[in-house]
Image (cartoon, rainbow, N blue to C red):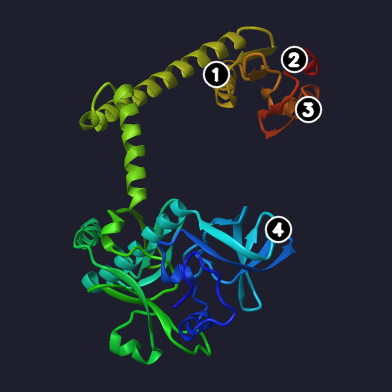
Amino acid sequence: MLPAAGSTPSSTPPPDAAILRAMDLLRCHEDAFLRALDTEVLACEPADDGHHVALADSILFPGGGGQPDDRGTIGDAQVIGVAERDGRVWYVTDRAVPTGPTRVEVDWARRFDYMQQHTAQHLLTALALRHFKLPTLAFHLNPERSDVVLDAPRLDAATIDALEARANEAIREAHPVQPRLIDPAELDTEGVRRRRLPPGHEGALRVVEIEGIDLNTCGGTHVSNTAQLQMIRLIGVDFQRGEARLHYLAGGRVLAAEREARARTEVLNRLLSGGPESHVESVERLLDQARADKQSQRALVAEIAGLLGAQLASGAATAALHREGADLAFLGAVAQAARAARSEQLVLLTAAPAGSAEGVFLLAGPPERVTACGPAVAEALAGRGGGRGDRYQGKATRLDRRDVAFARLA
């Protein structure tokens, strides 16, 4: 077997270990729950992304099979990534590591999280195929939520709920989960769920078995019993190109999501002055009120714009109006009202946030006068604009020069 934790690997490993190393299996593949290992640094080389470190053996999963690589420490150095070259795994560290004996420790919280998500994926994939005839086309183990992509153009709520129920039943049944090696000739007789083998592959394959449920080729790290998954929640589905991407949470992520939901519920209880059972009704009532208020606001704005337009029309042949907090839509309504009352009038309308010289402008009037004066107004206001017919509008950065712009209308 591989050297025990705390020992230094010999230069000539025993036959069993040689077979494992020939297949690129590390201690993390043999014991996913080992959090620290005394091993040996074989080489450390500077690189563009830090330093590349080769180990005699490692508990740091190097990535592959859809599972991200581990983080942890090699001595005092932080492991920030993994590189592969010359057929060897190199751990990327933030500093140099001396060759010789060292201690490797894994970021256990991160590792165990991915162990839960990965085993949950195996479970969901197996149950979706067995009970619902839905093959998995792909899966993604992501930092926040993971997913399995099923060969299904549609997936109704009843099927999703049934799959979730099956998965949590399997968790309660506490099925053992363990990796083992298998001869490729036994793949069919053992009923191994698998992808195509790499070209030219020789030697035994590593498989992960969920007892009584699934046997699958896999190089990742997993929990040792489905009970350690705690719970699986299916949280949504997206459909694209005849496939269903089913998002899920497992284990600690379910607990974290529940804590976040509880915190949001407490805030909503306070804001809506009621418990969760009344949230929907309260929000619907607020939305109805908001729609009614918006309609009233539109009516009032239209009325104000009409009054301002009529007031402008009753004045000089060339007039101006500045309105703080207004927008182009409001200025357009004012211009429309003024033009309706006095079509020969030329009006310059501007608007900006309170205390700001940046905003919008609109020139409205007889088309020939608008065409002649529009560019000059934009230049005076240090802005840019355009238009056709009886309107010329745009953005301005010097609305404090409104008097200069107005003078250009003479």
Q: Image check: 71 left or right of 144?
A: right
Q: On the image, numbered disc 4 is attached to which residue?
A: 96
3 and 2 marks in contact (CB < 8 Å): no
Q: On the image, numbered disc 2 is attached to which residue?
A: 400
Q: Image check: 257 left or right of 347?
A: left
Mark earlier in primary sequence (3, 4): 4
Q: Is residue 13 at all visible to an observer of this figure?
A: yes
Q: Nearer the viewer, residue 95 or 309?
A: 95
Q: Quadrant of the C terminus?
A: top right
Going by the numbered disc 3, the residue's amino acid type is: Ala
Give residue 372's mark.
Answer: 3
Residue 224 point in image, percent of width and height: 32, 65
Q: Residue at x 68, y 59 (%)?
A: 97
* Label 4: which secondary element: loop
* Label 3: which secondary element: helix
Q: Residues within 10 Å of mark 2 (few under 14, many from 20)?
A: some
Q: Is residue 202 above or below residue 112?
A: below
Going by the numbered disc 1, the residue's amino acid type is: Ala
Q: Nearer the viewer, residue 190 or 43?
A: 43
Q: On the image, numbered disc 1 is attached to which residue?
A: 337
Going by the numbered disc 4, the residue's amino acid type is: Ala
Mark earlier in primary sequence (3, 2): 3
Q: Residue at x 23, y 58 (%)?
A: 168
Q: Nearer the viewer, mark 3 or mark 4?
A: 4
